[in-house]
Image: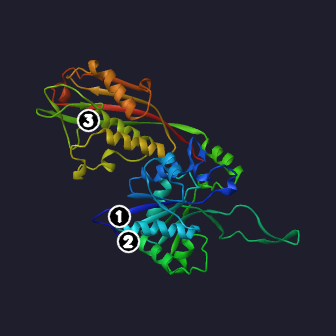
């Protein structure tokens, strides 16, 4: 399916309507903390920070409204049904009632560690298929068991363990749900779409998406979340022209000056350089990829939004920002009087301690465009920790 003129509307449905009784906790498992957050919060964060996801709907159990609000704050939700199939149908109906969608991802809240890479992988597969599901090949020996003893072996060739999220063209999965007989229960949505004659392809699954169901699964999930971190550093560079009549924003601070920086947004050259450095640590392109100058919605936009978007993508990958180093290159204004304010603002935007932010300034000895007072340049370096390759 082609979306040449407009980006597709893609909605994520997170199924979290179960009681979680098998988990052995005093509240539904989707609200039990895992890796420092209520389990459901991991999935909500992963979808809500992904640039391709238009909206997120959580399907909850009756009476779980307060638990959901405590776990994730303000998020769109609907009440589920007696079965998973009914809960998903309720979520799809909510999407229809709000104007429909082009694509939908249906995800179990009990699989908390969802990466942006997995979302990208599934959405790309929808270009050629009605549905796409993540799956891992079965590695263990399989046998039948009966009469108290082992029976024959089951060949593993072509056998996969299916995970979520499962991605579908919206109209296809809605039709599959509407046509499914009430007397039958489907194991997942992919089965329903496949049985209507549409192709469902497999994409490479992720061991981080193992489901949390039983008490021991919580310890296993904590262990997965605590996998070794590796350090990455990346640089960013930006330049903007100084012009009369413009405001001068540097490092998220409005600085008094006879000229300001000109650009499509507020032209905060410092935050732009840091944004590019942060995006580079996770290989997520550059600021123009996420906020193209050709898009009118970013005209005059505050650059702190770009910075926080980059930080949210790192968080969605399970990353931690350790340090940001910024060098401003200009003849004027003098940076020293504003250094502490900029450090505090950048630290606040990135939820860092000010000691994790370094700001330096230099001149070019009146050489070049910065030396002539025509513009300001910024160089930035960011260091983050991200989960290592399993």
Name the residue that disc number 3 marks: 268
Name the residue that disc number 2 marks: 1
Q: Position of residue 53 (x, y in %)?
A: 40, 57
Marks 2 and 1 sit apart, C-alpha to C-alpha, by 10 Å
Marks 3 and 2 sit apart, C-alpha to C-alpha, by 38 Å
User: Dot 2 lies on which element?
Assistant: loop
Image position of 124 with respect to 217: above or below: below
Image position of 361 with respect to 61: above or below: above
Q: Position of residue 119 (x, y in %)?
A: 47, 57
Q: Is residue 9 left or right of residue 374?
A: right
Q: Is residue 266 left or right of residue 323?
A: left
Mark 2 vs mark 1, foreground winner is: 1
Task: Mark 2 or mark 1: name the one nearer the start of the chain.
Answer: 2
Mark 1: few/some/many CA within 10 Å (<14, 14-19, 20+):
some
Q: Is residue 198 left or right of residue 243?
A: right
Q: Residue furthest right?
A: 148
Name the residue that disc number 1 marks: 8
């Amino acid at each position: 399916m082609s979306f040449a003129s407009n980006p597709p509307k893609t909605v994520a449905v997170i199924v979290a309507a179960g009681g979680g009784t098998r988990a052995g906790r005093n509240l539904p498992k989707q609200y039990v903390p895992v890796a420092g957050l209520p389990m459901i919060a991991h999935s909500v964060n992963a979808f809500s920070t992904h640039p391709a996801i238009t909206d997120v709907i959580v399907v909850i159990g009756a009476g779980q409204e307060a638990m959901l609000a405590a776990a994730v704050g303000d998020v769109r939700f609907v009440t589920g049904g007696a079965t998973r199939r009914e809960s998903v149908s309720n979520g799809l109906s909510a999407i229809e009632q709000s104007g429909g969608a082009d694509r939908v991802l249906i995800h179990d809240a009990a699989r908390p560690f969802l990466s942006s890479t997995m979302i990208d992988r599934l959405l790309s597969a929808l270009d050629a298929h009605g549905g796409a599901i993540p799956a891992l090949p079965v590695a263990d020996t399989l046998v039948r068991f009966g009469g108290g003893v082992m029976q024959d072996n089951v060949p593993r060739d072509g056998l996969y363990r299916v995970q979520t999220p499962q991605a579908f063209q919206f109209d296809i999965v809605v039709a599959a749900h509407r046509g499914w007989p009430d007397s039958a229960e489907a194991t997942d949505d992919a089965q329903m779409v496949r049985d209507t004659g549409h192709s469902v392809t497999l994409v490479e699954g992720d061991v981080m998406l193992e489901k949390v169901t039983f008490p021991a699964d919580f310890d296993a999930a904590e262990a997965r979340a605590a996998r070794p971190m590796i350090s990455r550093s990346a640089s960013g560079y930006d330049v903007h022209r100084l012009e009369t009549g413009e405001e001068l924003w540097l490092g998220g601070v409005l600085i008094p000056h006879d000229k300001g920086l000109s650009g499509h947004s507020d032209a905060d050259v410092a935050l732009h350089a840091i944004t590019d450095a942060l995006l580079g640590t996770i290989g997520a392109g550059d600021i123009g990829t996420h906020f193209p100058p050709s898009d009118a919605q970013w005209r005059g936009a505050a650059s702190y939004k770009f910075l926080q978007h980059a930080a949210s993508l790192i968080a969605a990958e399970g990353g931690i920002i350790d340090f940001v180093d910024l060098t401003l290159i200009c003849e004027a204004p003098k940076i020293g009087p504003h250094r502490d304010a900029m450090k505090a603002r950048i630290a606040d935007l990135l939820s860092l301690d000010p000691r994790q932010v370094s700001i330096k300034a230099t001149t070019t000895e009146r050489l070049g465009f910065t030396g002539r007072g025509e513009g300001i340049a910024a160089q930035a370096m960011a260091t983050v920790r991200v989960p290592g390759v399993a």
